[in-house]
Image (cartoon, rainbow, N blue to C red):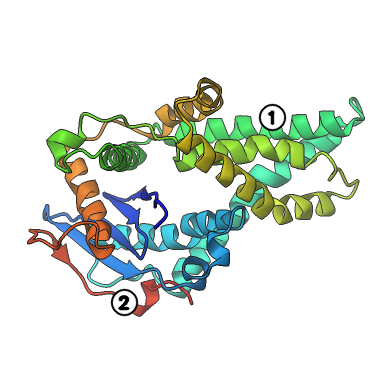
Amino acid sequence: MAKFHYGGQAVIEGVMMRGRTHMAVAVRNPQGEIVIRQEPLTSRIYTSRWGKLPFLRGLTALWDALGLGMRALLWSADVALAEEEAELSGPLAWGTLAGALALGIGIFFLIPSALAQWLERFWPSAWASSTIEGGIRLLMFLAYVWLIGRMPDIQRVFAYHGAEHKAINALEAGAELSPSAVARFSTAHTRCGTSFLLFVLVLAILFHIPLQFPEWYLRLLSRIVIIPVVAGVAYEFIRFSASHQEHPVVRLFVLPGLMLQRLTTREPDLDMLEVAIAALRSVLIADGVLASEASEVTRVPMVEELSPAS
C-alpha cells in the first residue's frame, strides 16, 4: 500500500484531521471537554481512482480546503460557541461559503487584474503584465495574512494550526503522540496549505502570461478557470518537495513557504496539542493504524448536513 500523508487544518478552538478513509474534527468546548466529530470520506473525489491520479488529485486538495474544511470550520464554531443546534449548516453554510468566495475573487483576482491592465499602457508586455498582476496579488495576500494575524481570535486559530503541524511532524517521526512529546516538534511543515497557496500564487504568474485579454471579464474568467490547473501543478510540487526535502535545491525552493508559515502558525500550549492529537488519533484508529482505545473525549453522532457530498 502506498504511503499516505496525513494532514489537516486548524478550526475554531480545534483541529480537523483528514485520514485515508475518514476525517475528524476535535474541538474543545467551553466546559473544557474535547468533542470529536468523525465522518467517512465517501465522496467519489476521495474513493475513485481518478481522484488519486497525479495533477487531478490536486482537486482533492481544493475540495478539502473549500468543502470539507468549511464544514469542519462551521461545526467547530457551533461547539466553541456552545450552540445547542448546528445552525450554521445546510443553505446557510454554503451561502456563507459562496459569499466568502465571491469576496475573495473580487479582492484577490479582480483588483490585481484591473490594476495590471491599467499599467499595461506603460509596460505593453504579457510578461510584465502577468508579473505585475501576480506581484500585486502576492503583496495583498501577505498583507491580509499579517493583518488578520494581529486579531486575538485568529492568533488562537494560528496556534491550533501550529498544533496540527506538530502532531503531524511527530507522527511522521514515529514519536509518541502525547502533548509533551509532540511539543518538541516544529510548527512548520513542508505540505502546509500556506506553502501550497504561495506556490499557487507564484505559478499563476507563469500560467497567466498567455491569458492577457483586453476585456476585463475575460481576464477574470480565465483566472478562475485556470485555478484547478495551477493548483494541480502546485500540489504535485508540494508532494515532490515533501519526499525530497533533504536535497539542498529542494530545501531552497521550500524555504519561502516555511518562512511564510511564521505568519500563519503560533506556538500552541499543551491543551491545544491535546486537541490536535485527539483528532489525529481518531483518523488513525479509523484507518486501522492505531488500535481503538478508551478515551475521555466526547464523540457526537454524524449528521447528514455534514456528510461529504456524493
Q: Residue at x 60, y 52 (%)?
A: 103
Left or right relative to 118: residue 285: left
Amino acid tagged 2: Val
Label whose residue precedes the other's in the sequence (2 or 1): 1
Circle 1: element type: helix
Residue at the spot 35% in from the left edge and 58% down from the top edge: 19
Q: Secondary structure at mark 2?
A: loop
Residue 218 in the image, given as x and y percentages of width and height:
83, 54
Q: Is residue 20 left or right of residue 259?
A: left
Query: In the rendered image of this protein, does residue 151 appear above or below residue 216?
Result: above
Tell me if mark 1 has few (under 14), some (14-19) or many (20+) residues whose alpha carbon lies within 10 angstroms of its own.
Answer: some
Looking at the image, residue 96 sits to the left or right of residue 265; the answer is right
Residue 215, label in figure: none
Image coordinates for residue 130, horizontal then vertical, percent: 79, 35
* Residue type beneath disc 1: Gly
Q: Mark 2 to mark 1: distance in Å?
A: 43 Å
Residue 271 location in percent, x, y? Answer: 15, 42
As displayed, is residue 185 above or below residue 237? Answer: above
Instruction: Give the side of residue 172 with respect to residue 210, left or right.
Output: left
Instruction: Pick whichever, 45 or 302, lies toward us.
Output: 45
**Which residue does the numbered mark 2 point to in the structure image?**
303
Residue annotated with mark 1: 135
Instruction: Please give the name of the residue rendered at 45% of the width and 40% of the height, measured from the top-left corner.
Output: 191
Tally of marks = 2
Query: In this rendering, does residue 82 appear at all?
Result: no
Q: Residue at x 48, y 54 (%)?
A: 65
Residue 24 shows in the view = yes
Residue 139 picture location, percent across and down: 61, 29
Relative depth, front residue between 240 and 121: 240
Give the vertical position of 92 relative to 294 (above or below). Answer: below
